[in-house]
């Protein structure tokens, strides 16, 4: 028996780990060689962590599973009728069971041209690019001929006030108002302006109103200008068009929308507006009980709407599918998948977070402590936990960020530099 798993994210790896001791050959395929802990990606983008702290090679995670092999490659097409998976490099794999967990990518709501001006955050490459963009803004301000020109560079806009937008805005404020405060001679980084732009009436839509309000207050205390009910209709090199007016901000970051992997289109099954597969209650696709879609790529409709794109959803779905494969449960005997919601947390800055667990609502330092503990606990390996704990302790005690690095010379940023 052969099980193919596409994607070594939270969902895919959970399936692979749960099939470790099962009588099936498991092949995991991913276009990258590492598993990425995306919830802490914003910390790489804002200089608090290094890429290696949150990314672990898939081989080192799976090397103890004797029945499992890893292939680095991009899956291009799925032939569900002949049970074959085609890779861009020409390799072809057949399968008895197929688990698709290819995740999502940010979407610009039909304005792909905005991507160049407003990068989104999904991969290590995105995070280091954003890190350089943020740090370059301060360097450009220092090189500006006068104060008026300099302050223009110190204007940052983040589009989307979900957890990632809130975390980015809070961290940029901390960099400007604390981390870099004393490091420049000509400019004052604390004169930076950070705008967080959200179309909905509140930040952190999806959180209870009281927590959204608290997050907004905490952000404002940090110096972030929160703009809710604000629709973005354009992004230019100068800034963002918000509610029909130009908001000057040469550094724009995108944290607003997601679209599922284009690979799913090759399955030729119904997709939702975000390109996710409308899976059946056992997470399989219609007419093919041996092909499953899990994690961010799946839309499992529940009485309260589709399940959110969160790591615990992907992991629990992975566990559920692995059990079906392990026990070879026929379709008609499968109990529907049920998600157990352990709660949600979002951090705003040092010592500040909001969260809910069941009926318990948390704010301030306690929420931040829980957020930190949960994230350390869920990192994939011991080494990452130690490294992240060390970097966070250093940041907490000194206020200094560990990785304030621009790795490309100035000349290589010319296309991004606005003179
Ligand atoms: C910036 C950010 C912050 C987040 N914060 C949180 C948070 O605080 N809490 C939370 O619970 N969730 C958070 N999430 C969401 C969480 O990371 C996702 O829900 C989770 O990663 C989904 O897991 P997955 O297995 O479906 O996909 P992913 O983890 O995205 O993994 C998909 C994998 O598939 C691979 N892949 C894609 N296409 C192909 C292909 N064609 N061929 C081969 N391989 C392919 C990718 O390289 C990747 O390794 C965050 C996400 C982001 C981007």
Image (cartoon, grey):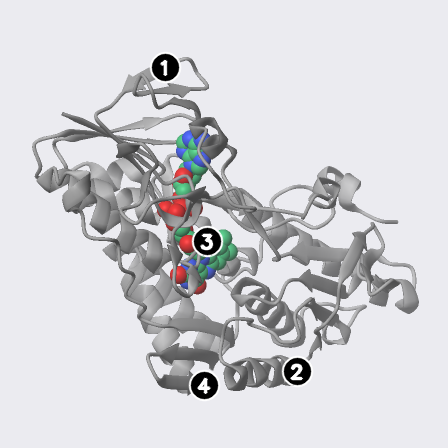
Q: State the image quarter where residue 98 is shown.
A: top left
Q: Is residue 41 visible?
A: no
Residue at image point 40% right, 71% down: 344
Residue topped by disc 1:
91
Residue topped by disc 2:
220
Q: State the image quarter where residue 89 is shown.
A: top left
Check the picture and name the quadrant holding the N terminus. top left
Residue topped by disc 4:
363
Mark sitting earlier along the chain (4/3): 3
Mark sitting earlier along the chain (3/2): 3
Mark sitting on residue 50: 3
Q: Where 49 sits versus 23, above or below?
A: below
Residue at image point 24% right, 57% down: 382
Q: Secondary structure at mark 2?
A: helix
Q: Secondary structure at mark 4?
A: strand
Query: Which callout, 1 or 2, points to the residue nearer the camera?
Result: 1
How much space separates mark 1 and mark 2, taking CA atoms?
53 Å
Could you tell whether 12 is left or right of 250 in the image?
left
Query: Which callout, 3 or 2, points to the residue nearer the camera?
Result: 2
Q: Are marks 1 and 3 in contact (CB under 8 Å)?
A: no
Residue 265, position as x, y percentages in the image: 49, 31
How much space separates mark 1 and mark 3, taking CA atoms?
33 Å
Q: Nearer the viewer, residue 406 or 69?
A: 69
Q: Secondary structure at mark 1?
A: loop
Q: Nearer the viewer, residue 303 or 306?
A: 303
Mark sitting earlier along the chain (2/4): 2
Q: Are marks 1 and 2 in contact (CB under 8 Å)?
A: no
Q: Are marks 2 and 4 in contact (CB under 8 Å)?
A: no
Query: Which callout, 1 or 3, points to the residue nearer the camera?
Result: 1
Query: Which callout, 4 or 3, points to the residue nearer the camera?
Result: 4
Residue 240, position as x, y percentages in the image: 80, 58
How much space separates mark 4 and mark 3, taking CA atoms?
28 Å
């Amino acid at each position: 028996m052969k099980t193919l798993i596409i994607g070594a994210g939270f969902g895919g790896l959970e399936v692979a780990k749960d099939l470790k001791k099962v009588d099936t050959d498991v092949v995991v395929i991913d276009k990258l060689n590492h598993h990425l802990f995306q919830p802490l990606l914003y910390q790489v983008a804002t200089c608090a962590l290094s890429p290696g702290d949150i990314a672990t090679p898939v081989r080192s995670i799976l090397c103890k599973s004797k029945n499992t092999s890893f292939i680095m490659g991009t899956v291009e097409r799925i032939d569900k009728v002949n049970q074959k998976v085609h890779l861009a490099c020409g390799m072809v794999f057949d399968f008895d069971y197929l688990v698709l967990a290819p995740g999502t990518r940010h979407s610009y709501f039909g304005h792909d041209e905005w991507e160049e001006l407003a990068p989104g955050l999904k991969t290590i490459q995105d995070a280091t690019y954003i890190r350089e963009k943020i740090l370059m803004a301060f360097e450009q301000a220092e090189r500006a001929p006068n104060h008026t020109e300099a302050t223009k560079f110190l204007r940052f806009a983040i589009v989307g006030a979900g957890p990632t937008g809130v975390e980015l805005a809070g961290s940029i404020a901390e960099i400007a108002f604390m981390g870099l405060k004393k490091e420049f001679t000509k400019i004052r980084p604390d004169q930076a302006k950070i705008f967080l732009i959200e179309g909905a009436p509140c930040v952190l839509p999806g959180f209870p109103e009281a927590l959204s309000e608290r997050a907004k207050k905490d952000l404002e205390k940090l110096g972030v200008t929160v703009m809710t009910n604000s629709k973005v209709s354009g992004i230019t090199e100068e800034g963002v068009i918000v509610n029909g007016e130009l908001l000057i901000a040469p550094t724009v970051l995108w944290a607003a929308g997601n679209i599922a992997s284009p690979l799913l289109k090759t399955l030729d099954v119904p997709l939702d507006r975000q390109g996710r597969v409308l899976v059946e209650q056992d997470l399989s696709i219609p007419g093919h009980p041996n092909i499953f879609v899990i994690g961010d790529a799946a839309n499992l409709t529940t009485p309260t709407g589709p399940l959110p794109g969160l790591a615990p959803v992907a992991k629990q779905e992975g566990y559920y599918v692995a059990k079906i494969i392990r026990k070879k449960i026929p379709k008609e005997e499968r109990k529907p998948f049920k998600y157990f919601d352990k709660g949600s947390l979002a951090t705003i800055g040092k010592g500040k977070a909001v969260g809910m667990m069941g009926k318990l609502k948390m704010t301030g330092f306690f929420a931040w402590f829980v957020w930190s503990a949960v994230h350390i606990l869920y990192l994939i390996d011991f080494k990452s936990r130690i490294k992240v704990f060390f970097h966070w302790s250093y940041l907490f005690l000194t206020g200094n960020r560990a990785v304030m690095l621009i790795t490309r010379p100035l000349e290589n940023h010319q296309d991004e530099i606005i003179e």
